[in-house]
Image (cartoon, helix red, strand yellow):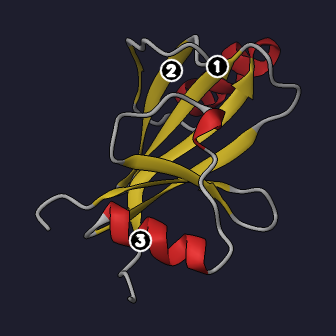
């Protein structure tokens, strides 16, 4: 078993509520990037803005209970179940309690605590 991990286009920055407005303004008004607020229905994220960042999308997520920001990355695989089994056999467990996810996706972390969203690659 050797799943093909690839970086996805989505990057999420989890931002404490007290720093959220200034962070959105930084991307929109100082960097002059394309920034749009998007509706969200998530128990841990109260607001989100989509930022066009080259070929990637940066999601600025307002989280009321954080004291510092965190960057979360997307990983895509052909088969989530196979990749999850592979990761678990290498001592990497899922941590789906971090934030609500659709079925067939998982949260994992590297040893430094960086969070990754593991999901199936489109077209595979």
Closer to the N terminus: mark 1 or mark 2?
A: 2
Spatial CA span between label 3 and label 2: 29 Å
Q: Is residue 3 left or right of residue 87?
A: left
- Mark 3, residue position: 83
Residue 4's place in the image compared with 122, above or below, is: below
- Mark 1, residue position: 62
* Residue 113: image location, x then y, percent: 78, 56
Spatial CA span between label 3 and label 1: 30 Å
Q: Is residue 55 left or right of residue 112?
A: left
* Residue placed most toward the observer, 82 or 22: 82
Quadrant of the rendering where the N terminus is positioned: bottom left
Report helix, strand or loop for mark 1. Answer: strand
Residue 31's place in the image compared with 46, above or below, is: below
Tell me if I can see residue 59 in this picture: yes
Residue occupying image coordinates x 58% and y 32%: 27
* Residue placed most toward the observer, 28 or 1: 1
Report helix, strand or loop for mark 2. Answer: strand
Within 10 Å of disc 3 (Cα), the crowding (few <14, some 14-19, many 20+) is many
């Amino acid at each position: 078993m050797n799943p093909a991990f690839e970086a996805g286009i989505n990057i999420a920055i989890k931002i404490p509520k007290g720093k959220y407005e200034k962070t959105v303004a930084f991307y929109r008004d100082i960097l002059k990037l394309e920034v749009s607020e998007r509706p969200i229905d998530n128990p841990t994220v109260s607001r989100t803005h989509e930022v066009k960042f080259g070929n990637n999308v940066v999601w600025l997520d307002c989280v009321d209970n954080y004291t510092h920001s965190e960057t979360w990355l997307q990983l895509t695989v052909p088969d989530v179940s196979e990749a999850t089994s592979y990761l678990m056999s290498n001592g990497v467990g899922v941590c789906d309690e971090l934030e609500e996810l659709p079925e067939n996706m998982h949260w994992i972390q590297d040893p430094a605590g960086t969070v990754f969203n593991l999901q199936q690659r489109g077209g595979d």
